[in-house]
Each structure stands twice: as structure tokens, then as C-alpha cells.
Image (spheres, rainbow, N blue to C red):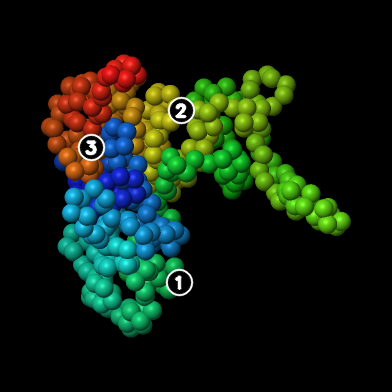
């Protein structure tokens, strides 16, 4: 479960200023939940919404050592007038296994400069470790691991996080946070849209791992009114390497084509005789089908799901129903959390006679005069329960909307 602080400041794509703090989205006073189950992030195009999710993806990749942070290339904020190179700082506050943690690190072109982890088991901060350069300090909560930590100090390079060593060593006090990055966080960036075969593979594996998933997936497709009445998934053998075959025959020796197995999905529509393949389905149907396994997995496991542009090719009523799955304790008994970016302003109003989003579940991203992105909540404006949030947002009452010029004049070249 995560929230976001207002010290979040981002420049142009994949360029980070001094601080990006990603923290729990708190519920309003009087709400006994530790965090809100849903948080929606609004803003104009190029305002920095996607960069916010990129920041969490970057933290996850750094902790799990699954991607490059760009160490050795310029990853700093690019819009400062003085051109100074400053470290980028990432901080996340999360609740996992019933305990609140704060984890962060500072990085520049040379490597990780700082790293720290604190826990709050009784609402008082306990230092698990602090790292500054190559010097580590371990708190009393980590005393039983001090000998192991002492050995680690000799092993950890500047381009490796201490938390990453949880994948190789059992570092008890650090494991809950590592497990959260490994198992508790799902991120679906818009730029990482899956190919049709990846969607078929994901859905096929989802159906195969639990016999209940077939009926749940079909029910959600039926509830979305996309016309699908049945789904079949099968593993097929596929010959690959036709170019390899041709390349080999030029040398007079035919190399046998390799065979791989992949999932193929077939869809039934009503009483139609011939089944449909995935590429026959609409973009909206494919996007909904791609989302369903992630949504159900997260609801089952009480995880966090981040989705960039959740409304892409989805009808507003369908997006509202998806949000409702996380709002309801009946469908979200394990406290899963959905955080998403969107341009769908209908979610700010009432749909089907009820509010889709509560006032403490709406956030805005806007650029300041420097070109840096700033994040702030709707609750800063102390909105009344009866006010039309959608209308006020579109009118610019909360900022985070584009300042548009004269399109006709631009087309006419004036």
C-alpha cells in the first residue's frame, strides 16, 4: 500500500529532480483504514503523471536488480538554469505485514550515494540501517544481523543497493520490504503494452494455474458486455525460424526448425459457428482481457496495482466498475490497492447514482514555472460533498489542465 507526498518533482520524461517521495495515500480522518483502496491521478498531457509511476517502477527495478537506473548517464533534472548535477532521491512509505516502513535511496551518475530503511512497529521510528557513501550504520532492530551486515559492507558496490542483497541472503528485518517490492507491487505502464501473443500467454497461464479463474474471467467478460460467451485456451506447438530454415538451405544443409509452445485463445460470440481469435476482438476488449488477470491476482493477494492510463479504450462505465471492485470490501477483502492515472473526468462525478471516487482519492499533477511536476490532493481545496468536482476541474479550478491556444489560428499559420 502506497501514498504520494507533495515533494514529488519531476521534469521531462525519465528525468528526476532532487526528490521523488512515494508514500501511503492516507484515508481521511475518521476512516479506520490505513490507506485508501483507490487513488486516481489527473493532469494534462506531459504533466508528469506517467513519470510518477515510472519512479515506482524504477525503485522496484533497482531493488530487484532487474533493470538499469541509468548510472553513468545523465538522469538528473534537466530544467535547472544553473545546470547543476544533483542526486535523485526516491523515498517510499509502505505498509506490509502490518508494519509501516520508510525506504529510500539517493543516486547520481556515479552510483548510490545514500540508502535507508526505517520501521514503525509501534508508531515510533526504528532505524534498520542507514548508508552514506560506503559507510553503514545498523540500528538495534538489526543487531542480530550485525555480523552478516559487517561482511556485506565489503561486498556492496556503489551500483548495488543493500536491499538487493535480500535476494541472496536472508536478511530478516529487511525481508518484508524486499518481499513487498518482489511480490506486492504490480506495475502496468502504458509504454509496456503487451503484444497479442503476450496477452494470450498471460491469460493462458492465468487460466491454467487455478480452475476457478476460467469462470471468473468469463464472468467479467460477460459483465463488460463485450459479446463473448465462451473462452478456450490451448497450448499449441509452433515452428519458429523460417528465416533460419532458408539461411541453412543456401549452404546445402537444412537445419530443422525449432519448436516452441505457446497459448492460443479462441472466443465464442453467441451462437456463431466459427470462433474468434484475439486479433479479431476490438482494442477495448483486448485491453479489458489484458487487465483481468492482474486485477484478480491483486485482489486475491492484497497487492498494489499501478496502471497508467487505465481508461485507454475502455468505456467510462467499465472503468467505474473496475474501480468499484477495489472500493468494496466484498470483492477486496485483503486490502488491495489500485493507483492509476487517467483523463476520464466522469469518474470525478456521480455515475449510476453514486460517487466513483471519494474526495481523498483524487490527486492532481501540474507543472510549475520551472517545468517541474508537482503533485497535490483534491483535499487541499477543502471541497464540499455536494460540489461538482468534474465541472470545477475542467474549468481549471484545481489546476492540472492544459492551457490551450487557438487551434484554428495555428492551422491557418497565423
Q: Quadrant of residue 159?
A: bottom left
Classed neighbour count for the residue bearing mark 1: other residues with Cα under 10 Å, few (<14), some (14–19), many (≥20): few
The Cα atoms of the two marked residues, 3 and 2, are separated by 24 Å
Q: Secondary structure at mark 1?
A: loop
Marks 1 and 2: which is nearer the front? 2
| Near-viewer residue (322 or 59) | 59
Classed neighbour count for the residue bearing mark 2: other residues with Cα under 10 Å, few (<14), some (14–19), many (≥20): some
Residue at image position (43%, 63%) is 65
| Near-viewer residue (392 or 222) | 392
The Cα atoms of the two marked residues, 3 and 1, are separated by 41 Å
| Residue 187 x, y percent position in the rendering | 41, 47
| Residue 403 x, y percent position in the rendering | 23, 27
Quarter of the image where the C terminus is located: top left
Give above or below for 365 relative to 273. Answer: below
Q: Is residue 121 visible?
A: no
Identify the mark at residue 168; answer none if there is no mark. Answer: 1
Q: Is residue 265 visible?
A: yes
Give above or below for 23 relative to 221. Answer: below
Amino acid at each position: 500500500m502506497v501514498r504520494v507526498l507533495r515533494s514529488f518533482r519531476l521534469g521531462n520524461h525519465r528525468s528526476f529532480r532532487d526528490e521523488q517521495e512515494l508514500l501511503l495515500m492516507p484515508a481521511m480522518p475518521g476512516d479506520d483504514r490505513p490507506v485508501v483502496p483507490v487513488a486516481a491521478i489527473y493532469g494534462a498531457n506531459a504533466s508528469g503523471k506517467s513519470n510518477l509511476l515510472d519512479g515506482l517502477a524504477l525503485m522496484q527495478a533497482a531493488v530487484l536488480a532487474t533493470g538499469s537506473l541509468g548510472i553513468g548517464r545523465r538522469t538528473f533534472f534537466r530544467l535547472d538554469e544553473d545546470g547543476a548535477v544533483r542526486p535523485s532521491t526516491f523515498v517510499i512509505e509502505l505498509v506490509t505485514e502490518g508494519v509501516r516502513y520508510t525506504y529510500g535511496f539517493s543516486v547520481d551518475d556515479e552510483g548510490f550515494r545514500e540508502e535507508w530503511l526505517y520501521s514503525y512497529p509501534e508508531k515510533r521510528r526504528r532505524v534498520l540501517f542507514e548508508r552514506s557513501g560506503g559507510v553503514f550504520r545498523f540500528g538495534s532492530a538489526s543487531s542480530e544481523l550485525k555480523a552478516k551486515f559487517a561482511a556485506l559492507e565489503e561486498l556492496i558496490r556503489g551500483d548495488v543497493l543493500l536491499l538487493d542483497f535480500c535476494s541472496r541472503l536472508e536478511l530478516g528485518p529487511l525481508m518484508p520490504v524486499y518481499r513487498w517490492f518482489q511480490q506486492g507491487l504490480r506495475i502496468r505502464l502504458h509504454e509496456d503494452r503487451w503484444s497479442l501473443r503476450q496477452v494470450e500467454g498471460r491469460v493462458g497461464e492465468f487460466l491454467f494455474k487455478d480452475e476457478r479463474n476460467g469462470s471468473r474471467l468469463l464472468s467479467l467478460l460477460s459483465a463488460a458486455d463485450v459479446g463473448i460467451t465462451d473462452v478456450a485456451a490451448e497450448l499449441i506447438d509452433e515452428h519458429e525460424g523460417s528465416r533460419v530454415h532458408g539461411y541453412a538451405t543456401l549452404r546445402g544443409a537444412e537445419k530443422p526448425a525449432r519448436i516452441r509452445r505457446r497459448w492460443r485463445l479462441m472466443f465464442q460470440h453467441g451462437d456463431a459457428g466459427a470462433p474468434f481469435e484475439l486479433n479479431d476482438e476490438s482494442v477495448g476488449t483486448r485491453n479489458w482481457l489484458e487487465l483481468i488477470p492482474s486485477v484478480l491476482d491483486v485482489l486475491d493477494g492484497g497487492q498494489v496495482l499501478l496502471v497508467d492510463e487505465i481508461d485507454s479504450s475502455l468505456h467510462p462505465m467499465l472503468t467505474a466498475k473496475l474501480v468499484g471492485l477495489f472500493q468494496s470490501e466484498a470483492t477486496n477483502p485483503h486490502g488491495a490497492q489500485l493507483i492509476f492515472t487517467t483523463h476520464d473526468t466522469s469518474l470525478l462525478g456521480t455515475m449510476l447514482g453514486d460517487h466513483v471516487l471519494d474526495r481523498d482519492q483524487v490527486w492532481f499533477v501540474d507543472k510549475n514555472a520551472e517545468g517541474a511536476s508537482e503533485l497535490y490532493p483534491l483535499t487541499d481545496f477543502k471541497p464540499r460533498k455536494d460540489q461538482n468536482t468534474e465541472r470545477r476541474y475542467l474549468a481549471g479550478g484545481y489546476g492540472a489542465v492544459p492551457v490551450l491556444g487557438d487551434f484554428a489560428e495555428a492551422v491557418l499559420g497565423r
